[in-house]
Image (cartoon, coloured by chain):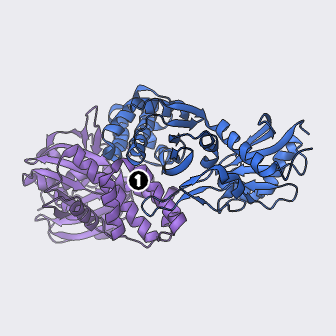
Chain colours: A purple, B blue
């Protein structure tokens, strides 16, 4: 048993599982990470996967768990129906759905749907990262980059609207499965805000309509001039992020003052790209801290009366 | 033996093989088609594949063969080094490379490279489709849609420059391997210039920078509103073609008077998209006739003195 354990929180996505055991003040007592995403977990059973991690930490029966992410989708543990945007985020915890678990209360936070005929969109997991910002009454844009980057407009803490860009998925498809792939084969891991990256951002923002041509030029540059794999990778990354920034500005307005919620190597890439785009006053928040803080707040709201620790 | 057979011509690409036996006046005496693209043919042997088709038609030893396409690439039969753009196309046949064949003269036409540091690009096969237009002294844009759509600027018959767009490959990747795929699963074959297609073209041209967002909306529209698979497919097609047209106009200028070289269902799609884009005076040429005519002209130029029929 862990001293002071109040509840456990889990961010369970398509391809990853992250769990934190938290004290009532939000202190992290223990954590677990794995690559047990939805498909793997559905085969093994969601409760079995969760309980195996809890057992490894010695978490007692009865300790409640709050979760967010794709685990609440139709192909997850149990569907937590979308809340409709625009909305205030305070009520998110109340709308958490109980998952069928034998040993403890388990709740899954709902995602958010934008049921606009012209701009339908969905999110699952990012809404939880937004809770802290919303509670502060933040006014302005929030960027949550990733496989499916989210751009969210908050208006005095309410979620007014959002737009998802397939940037990370396009990068993955082009890097692994397209005619661009040979130009990047052998690139080192990572990648950074190099000159090639900056050139890609600038070119995509200056002429976003030529994206499909710029992508093919990565192959041609490799064939004709032997462009180095790292250079091609960084330029591809820059082109796609530049296209996203141009699109976000078009959809949601000026990028000044954007709060960037990101962790790992993607954070400096987007920060530098936003600077290249001329956006002023960018603030960076750590994505992992945000999702943990949001889950903690939701757990406090949902469990403090019913599941109080002795 | 075929009466009046002058030569055989072959368009040999990454995923298809098309062969025509031609009379000296270009009349088609016989044809063969197969899915024996580069990878399959490299395993079997290029000469063996070619000779098996010629044997099936009873083509005698000694009858010469003119080829174009990816068969002349580094991973083809023998590399026919790129000619550099800008260039006049008349000399293409003279630059054909002899493939090592035991029974007959076999030549492969070179592709074209644009060795521009800012806009590197390559083509193999399309240059042969352009021969007839170039011989007519055509002035203006030519669009050759496909997996990698080519937009070519001809100036009084000379190839001034070109730009490749990954439109067809992006469509394939998104349709089969992305989160958009489930929204299109179960769509009928084909697809047409429907209202959904036209909406995609218009939206992409109006705001090309939002492409990455529009693509994700296809998934969200399916999740939230149950968009029909055919509708999602046509809108995806429209979005990507609209982005291409906006990019071609940006790179190469006004689209009025474009000659569209296309065969099959892609021809009406691009014709209608160009009309939606407000391009006037579009003319359509059949791609298969163009490549055959180009190969025939090259065969006449290369073989008429050396390999004349009795």
Disc 1 is placed on an element classified as helix
- Answer left or right for B273 relative to A259: right
Q: Is residue A245 above or below residue B276?
A: below
Q: Position of residue A263 (x, y in %)?
A: 26, 65
Whether residue B190 is visible to the viewer of this picture, yes or no, is no
In percent of the image, x 20 and y 48: which residue is there?
A152
Q: Which sits in the foreground, B8 or A291?
A: B8
Q: Which image quarter: residue A80?
A: top left
Q: Is residue A31 above or below residue B157?
A: below
In percent of the image, x 18 and y 64: which residue is there?
A284
Quadrant in which the C terminus of chain B appears: top right
Q: Position of residue B65 (x, y in %)?
A: 79, 50
Q: Which sits in the foreground, B91 or A151?
A: B91
Q: Position of residue B191 (x, y in %)?
A: 51, 31
Quadrant in which the N terminus of chain B appears: top right
Whether residue B93 is visible to the viewer of this picture, yes or no, is yes
Q: Which sits in the foreground, A54 or B85?
A: B85
Q: Position of residue A153 (x, y in %)?
A: 17, 47
How would you rate the neighbour count of disc 1 (Cα within 10 Å): few for under 14, some for 14-19, many for 20 or more?
many
In percent of the image, x 51 and y 48: which residue is there?
B169
Q: Is residue A160 above or below residue B74?
A: above
Question: How many marks on residues?
Answer: 1
- Answer left or right for B43 relative to B230: right
**Which residue bears the numbered disc 1?**
A170
């Amino acid at each position: 048993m862990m001293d002071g354990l109040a509840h456990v929180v889990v961010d369970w996505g398509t391809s990853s599982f992250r769990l934190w055991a938290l004290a009532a003040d939000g202190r992290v007592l223990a954590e677990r990470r794995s690559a047990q995403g939805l498909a793997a977990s559905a085969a093994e059973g969601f409760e079995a996967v969760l309980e195996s991690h809890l057992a490894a930490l010695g978490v007692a029966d009865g300790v409640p768990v709050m979760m967010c992410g794709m685990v609440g989708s139709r192909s997850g543990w149990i569907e937590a129906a979308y809340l409709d945007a625009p909305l205030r985020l305070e009520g998110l915890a109340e709308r958490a759905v109980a998952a069928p678990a034998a040993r403890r209360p388990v709740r899954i936070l709902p995602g958010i749907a934008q049921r606009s005929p012209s701009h339908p969109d969905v999110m699952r997991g990012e809404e939880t990262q937004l809770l802290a910002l919303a509670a502060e009454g933040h006014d302005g844009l929030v960027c949550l980059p990733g496989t499916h980057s989210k751009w969210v407009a908050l208006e005095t803490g309410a979620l007014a609207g959002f737009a998802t860009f397939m940037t990370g998925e396009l990068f993955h498809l082009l890097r692994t499965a397209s005619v661009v792939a040979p130009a990047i084969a052998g690139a080192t891991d990572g990648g950074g805000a190099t000159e090639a990256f900056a050139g890609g951002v600038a070119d995509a923002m200056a002429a976003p309509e030529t994206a499909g041509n710029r992508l093919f030029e990565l192959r041609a540059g490799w064939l004709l001039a032997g462009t180095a794999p790292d250079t091609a990778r960084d330029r591809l990354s820059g082109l796609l992020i530049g296209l996203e920034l141009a699109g976000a500005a078009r959809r949601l307005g000026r990028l000044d003052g954007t709060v960037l919620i990101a962790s790992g190597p993607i954070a400096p890439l987007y920060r530098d790209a936003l600077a290249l785009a001329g956006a002023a006053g960018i603030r960076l928040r750590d994505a992992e801290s945000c999702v943990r803080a949001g889950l903690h707040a939701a757990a406090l709201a949902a469990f403090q009366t019913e599941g109080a620790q002795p």
